[in-house]
Each structure stands twice: as structure tokens, then as C-alpha cells.
Image (cartoon, rainbow, N blue to C red):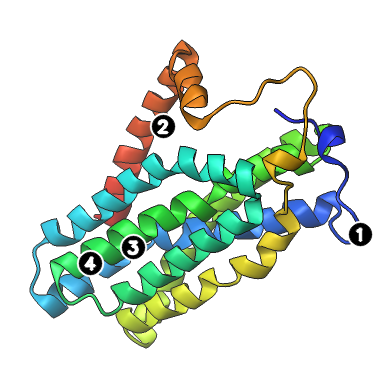
Amino acid sequence: MMSASVLGKAAGWRTPLIIIACGCVIAMLTFGPRSALGQFLTPMSLTYGWGREVFSLAIAIQNLLWGLGQPFAGALADRFGTVRVLCVGAFLYAAGLALMAYSSTPGLLQVSAGVLIGFGLSGCSFNLVIGAFGKLVPERLRGLAFGAGTAAGSFGQFLFSPLARALIDQFDWAVALLVFAAGMLLILPLSLALRTPRADSVSVPGVAPQSLFQALSEAFSHRSYVLLVLGFFTCGFQLAFETVH
């Protein structure tokens, strides 16, 4: 991992506290709507006469693409900087939520709730935030930053479910999705605090450059990493099932 001294200190307003605070808000915003999507299963299914399998398939696609897209999003963030990837991810996430409000066919739902939100999550959720913390936050505060960022994502799951319920009851499910889509655009200004340099502008003595596939090959040859991934897969499988149904 690149040290904070190599990357330089955050200048001006980008103090460690600001970086951690903005990253935590991004983690909360991105984890919130995807964990509250189960609130939309019943009203959307009743509106369009769908069975549960239509909505469930779209969310399954979302979760699979979220996981598959993360290593590529991380590689792009290393190469082009975190801000660009966060902004693209936020736009995809917002577009998916907005299109989901008008998804009157199973195919549209799979594109919006599945493909767009799935890839959007991989580009702007806590995986990018944690990576930015590792590069920008001083080592003495890094453990605190990682813990706070992870906890903020969990708090988003806690916060957005009752918020979704309130919006659906007060207005309707389509309005709730559009409100969530607008909320994702807050990531754009917040991402400026997590700006990291491009890979070609940073040289780390003693560390050879790696391609994406070299990094993945190294990771999957590590037994501990494989076991960790399997653990997260099991956790995510049951958690996604429960939050949707």
C-alpha cells in the first residue's frame, strides 16, 4: 500500500477530519438505497402484476455486478484518480434509481436496478472510500478511518429503510426512488475531498508496477484472501436475500 508520505499531505481544506467525514457520508449514501430496495418489491410487483422472481432477479444481477466490478473500479481509481471513478459511479447509481422509477417491464428493471445500480455501486461505494482512506489518511488515523467508513455504510442501511418507507407512504414508490436518485448526486461534491493522484504521477521506491490481472492473480493465489472472499460471499448472499424479501 502506498504510504501517506509518498502521496503527500492533503492541502488546505482537505484535512484528515474532512476526508474521513466526506468518505463516511459517501459510504452512508451509497449503502442506504441498495439496502432499502426490498421496500419497493411489493408496491412495484402490485403495480405491474409481477411475481417476486422479477424483482429478485434484478437485485441478484445488481449484487453480482457490484462484486465483479469492484476490482476494475479500484484499478481505474488507481490509474485515473478516485474522484473520476466516484463521479461516474454516482451518475450510474443515480441513473439506475431514476430509471427504476419508470421500469414498467422486467427487462427495464434488470437494466436499471440490476446493471446500472450494480456497476454504480462498484464505482462509488465503500470499497473506493476505504481505498482513498488508505492513501490520504495518516497512518495513525487509518484504523479509525477504516472503522468509521465501514460503520457509516452500516448506518446507511439502518437509516434509509425507514426513510424509504416514509417516502412511499407519504408519496409513492416512484417518488421515493427519484428522491434517492437525487441524493446520489451529493456524492459529486463530496468526492472532491477524496481526490487521489493518478498512478503515473506517483512513484513508490521498491514497488514494481502491476497490471490488473497480475494483481488479481496474486490475490487469488493467497489462501487467506480466497477464504475472506468466500466469507463475504456467504454474508452478502444471505444479507441481500433478507433485505430484499
Q: Look at the numbered disc 3 and give the secondary structure of its residue.
A: helix
Q: Nearer the viewer, residue 220 or 84?
A: 84
Instruction: Tell which circle, 3 or 1, labels the residue nearer the N-terminal end.
Output: 1
Per the image, the residue denoted by label 4 is: 109
- Closer to the eye: label 1 or 2: 1
Question: Residue 234: x percent and y percent?
Answer: 33, 31
Q: Amino acid at mark 2?
A: Phe
Q: Is residue 22 left or right of residue 37?
A: right
Badge 4 amino acid: Leu
Precedes in sequence: disc 3 or disc 4:
3
Q: Residues within 10 Å of mark 1 (few under 14, many from 20)?
A: few
Disc 3 or disc 4, which is closer to the eye?
4
Position of residue 158 measured from the top left corner of the image (x, y, whole percent): 49, 57
Checking the image for residue 37, the label placed there is: 3
Label 4 to label 2: alpha-carbon separation: 26 Å
Between discs 4 and 1, the one toward the N terminus: 1
Image depth: mark 4 or mark 2 in front: 4
